[in-house]
Amino acid sequence: MSSRTAPRLMTLQRHLGGPQAGNMATESSPLTTHVLDTASGLPAQGLCLRLCRLEAPSQQWMELRTSYTNLDGRCPGLLTQSQMKPGTYKLSFDTERYWKERGQESFYPYVEETQKFHVPLLLSPWSYTTYRGS
């Protein structure tokens, strides 16, 4: 097995829940995300994100949590069931910092998504894609 093959196999095992899946604990959070770096073909590890909720009646965003994606590009435990209440939520991904740390310019300094329960994000320096997750 080549030195390039081993990390990819470990990543696949984590995605599939194999023996190397230690960092893929069952997510009990009602709000999840999974970020993939499409430029490298790997999960986007260490991407800073902020979770906010739109507060009524002020209509101001209240920051609930700042966190970073793990080795698998996920951020488990963003919000507990007891913290989740009806409303509008926003995930802000600090893509500018992520790309600068990798010595890469990018077109989008941040990505913001609202109102979804699972937010898959496919990320490259010049584009991003998100879609309604399961």
Image (tube, rainbow, N blue to C red):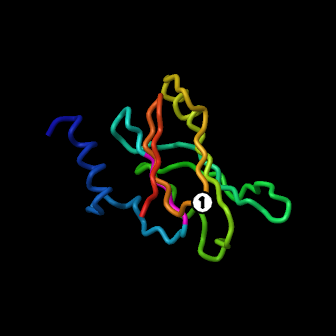
Q: Which residue is disc 1 drawn over?
A: 115
The residue located at (53%, 63%) in the rendering is: 117
Quadrant of the drawing holding the C terminus: bottom left
Asked if residue 16 is positioned above or below residue 7 in the image, the reply reads: below
x, y (%) of residue 1? 14, 40
- What residue lies at 64% left-to-right and 77% top-to-bottom? 82
12 or 6: nearer the eye? 12
Q: Nearer the viewer, residue 128 or 92?
A: 128
Q: Could you classify mark 1 by the number of other residues whose Cα lies within 10 Å: few (under 14), some (14-19), or many (20 or more)?
A: some
Q: Nearer the viewer, residue 6 or 42?
A: 42
Q: Looking at the image, which residue is at 52% across and 30% down?
A: 99
| 34 shown above or below 87 | above
Q: Residue furthest left?
A: 1
Name the residue furthest bottom: 82
| Residue beneath the point at 60% across and 71% down | 80
- Residue type at mark 1 is Gln
Q: Position of residue 66 (x, y in %)?
A: 65, 52
| Residue 110 % position (x, y) | 60, 37
Q: Is residue 42 left or right of residue 10?
A: right
The image quadrant of residue 41 is: top left
Percent coordinates x, y for residue 120 in the rendering: 45, 52
Q: Secondary structure at mark 1?
A: loop
Above or below residue 45? Residue 17 is below
Q: Is residue 24 left or right of residue 104?
A: left
In the image, taking residue 60 as reference, residue 101 lies left or right, namely left
- Magenta run includes residue 34: yes
Q: How many marks?
A: 1
Magenta: main secondary structure equals strand
Q: Which residues are magenta?
A: 31-35
